Image: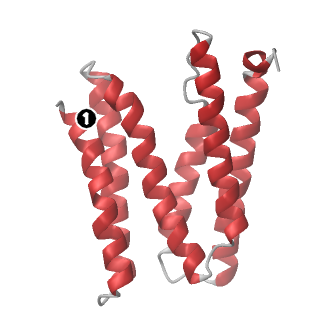
Amino acid sequence: MNLPNKLTLLRIVLILPFLLVLYLDIPFAAYVALAIFIAASLTDMLDGKIARKYHLITDFGKFADPLADKMLVTAAMLWFVEKGQMPGWALLIVIVREFAVSGLRMVASDKGRVIAAGWSGKVKTAATMVCIILMFLPIPPWVNTACVAVIVAATIYSGVEYFIKNKDCLSDM
């Protein structure tokens, strides 16, 4: 297994201590969880750079890397929903978008087409990561609300953009 794939697996494995720290409510739990979240997020950036630079892109990486990202982000957002920091409907929008875009990619793949991550998807990911990091800090409620709004807006925008740019994949529907 190459280094980028090991980093992807590490990101998945880090979800367990991330959640354990939060649920066991150890001293400074939010800060420890934040450090784990940042470390896990950095493995995403690092594995992608290494894979592209050294041509280590694998089918496992294509499958596991986005899955690991979705698992980490969903774990954090579930925690925020449980704490009352994020409404459940906001998380539902994120999850529905992920399923919809994944489904669109499967349909495109059946037609021999690959839908790469678009600019808006990368912005959505970056904005979501920054907002999650902020939400672990002691921020005023209005900043938390703004973070939720940014996550929802970026999620909807990028999802709509994926479907508009690739509507021809669904032409037989």
Q: Position of residue 136 (x, y in %)?
A: 47, 75
- Quadrant where the N terminus is found in the figure: top left
Q: Position of residue 90 (x, y in %)?
A: 70, 63
The scheme the figure's colours follow is secondary structure
Horizontal arrangement in the rendering, residue 89 relative to residue 118 (left or right): right
Residue visible at 53% across and 68% down in the picture: 78
| Above or below: residue 28 compared with residue 127 | below
Q: Position of residue 28 (x, y in %)?
A: 33, 86
Q: Amino acid at mark 1?
A: Pro
Neighbour tally class for label 1: few under 14, some 14-19, many 20 plus, Cα within 10 Å: many
State which quadrant residue 114 falls in: top right
Q: Position of residue 162 (x, y in %)?
A: 70, 31
Residue visible at 32% across and 29% down in the picture: 60
| Above or below: residue 129 compared with residue 63 | below
- Quadrant where the C terminus is found in the figure: top right
Horizontal arrangement in the rendering, residue 25 relative to residue 106 (left or right): left
Residue topped by disc 1: 4
State which quadrant residue 117 falls in: top right
Residue visible at 26% across and 22% down in the picture: 56
Name the secondary structure under disc 1: helix
Horizontal arrangement in the rendering, residue 119 relative to residue 167 (left or right): left
Residue visible at 76% across and 37% down in the picture: 160
- Which residue in the rendered view is the most extreme toward the bottom? 27
Q: How many marks?
A: 1
- Which residue in the rendered view is the most extreme toward the top? 112
